[in-house]
Image (spheres, grey):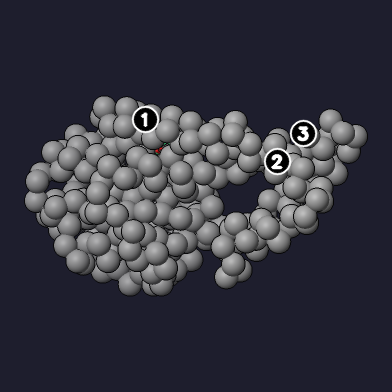
Amino acid sequence: MTGEAAPAQGFALDRPLLLIGCGKMGGAMLEGWLARGLSPEKAFVVEPAGAPALAARGITVLSSLDEVPAGLDPAAIVVAVKPQTMDKVLPVLAGIAGPRSLVLSIAAGKRLALFEGAFGAGTPVVRAMPNTPAAVGRGMTVLVAGGAAGAMDCDLAGRLCAAVGEIGWVEDEALIDVVTALSGGGPAYVFLMIEVLAKAGEKLGLSPDLAMRLARQTVSGSGELARLSSEPADQLRRNVTSPAGTTERALNVLMAADGLQPLFDRAIEAATARSRELAG
Ligand SMILES: NC(=O)C1=CN([C@@H]2O[C@H](COP(=O)(O)OP(=O)(O)OC[C@H]3O[C@@H](n4cnc5c(N)ncnc54)[C@H](O)[C@@H]3O)[C@@H](O)[C@H]2O)C=CC1
Ligand SMILES: O=C(O)[C@@H]1CCC=N1
């Protein structure tokens, strides 16, 4: 993977940005672009559920693709609807893209070829897989470029994603299924870790509130330490683990032959397989 720590740059776009679907991921990315200087009058959002708070900030919010002004000629169309909605959206979208519009899809599973087929083979398409920590500017997004995406298209796609965290690029599109399983869904596994840690503490007598507070702060504090420390993860783990101490006993369970690694192997394989299925 390349370009892991691309600097987030501003958005002095001369043409509009069109976001299709302003849910959890699309909404988080939009906030990142606005925070980086995208001017609200350049932002067009299609969101059937409405977004009055965005409209109040001067963003054009449309409830359907049919309302997109003719001749908008967006610099980029960011497709952030569910994969299952894609078949309905793509035929209409194809008529909205301008000849120079970048198409950036964040949908799980959906292949570059699907977009190139819908928009035309010469259309610059980039696929990206972000994650929800984007909502606090700490996302991880991996991108892959289609054949017609040139340097300027990749630069714009990279900037759109770097506005909400770190980015990296892969050349092999098949790897995006694994990325989807690991970092796309990864926040859910970490939040589950908070839940199960708290539940284990509760079972041993801690109040639910205290157990949850300890679990949440432990996971977020450890994440921050992992981010800021130059030590590798296994050394950070060893730093906690006193010989013949308490942590060692827990790790004997978690690192047993039937412990966390085989469990995560199965979980990530299952999610990777689902991403391949979603290709449709
Ligand atoms: N939630 C996550 O952690 C991640 C999601 N993704 C991908 O991002 C995409 C969006 O996922 P979420 O934001 O979680 O879903 P979401 O359900 O929060 O957002 C999707 C939005 O699309 C809107 N929508 C539905 N039909 C539409 C149409 N015809 N035109 C325009 N908008 C329409 C919905 O009203 C909704 O607000 C999915 O393809 C998903 O695979 C990618 C990485 C992480
Ligand atoms: O669960 C999903 O399908 C999406 C893709 C990665 C995270 N959420």
Q: Label 2's element?
A: helix
Q: Residue at x 14, y 52 (%)?
A: 147
Which mark is drawn over residue 64? none
Residue position for label 2: 252
Q: Nearer the viewer, residue 228 or 239?
A: 239
Q: Label 3's element?
A: helix
Please name the amino acid that badge 3 sits on: Lys
Structural crowding at the residue carrying mark 2, measured as other residues with C-alpha within 10 Å and reported as few (<14), some (14–19) or many (≥20): few
| Image side of residue 112 versus residue 191, left or right | left
Q: Nearer the viewer, residue 84 or 262?
A: 262
Vertical relation: 106 (above or below) 270: below
Of labels 2 and 1, earlier in sequence is: 2
Of labels 2 and 3, earlier in sequence is: 3
Ligand 1: give its quadrant: top left
Vertical relation: 173 (above or below) 110: below
Please name the amino acid that badge 1 sits on: Ala
Q: Residue at x 28, y 37 (%)?
A: 110
Q: Quadrant of residue 12?
A: bottom left
Residue position for label 1: 273
Q: Nearer the viewer, residue 8 or 48?
A: 8
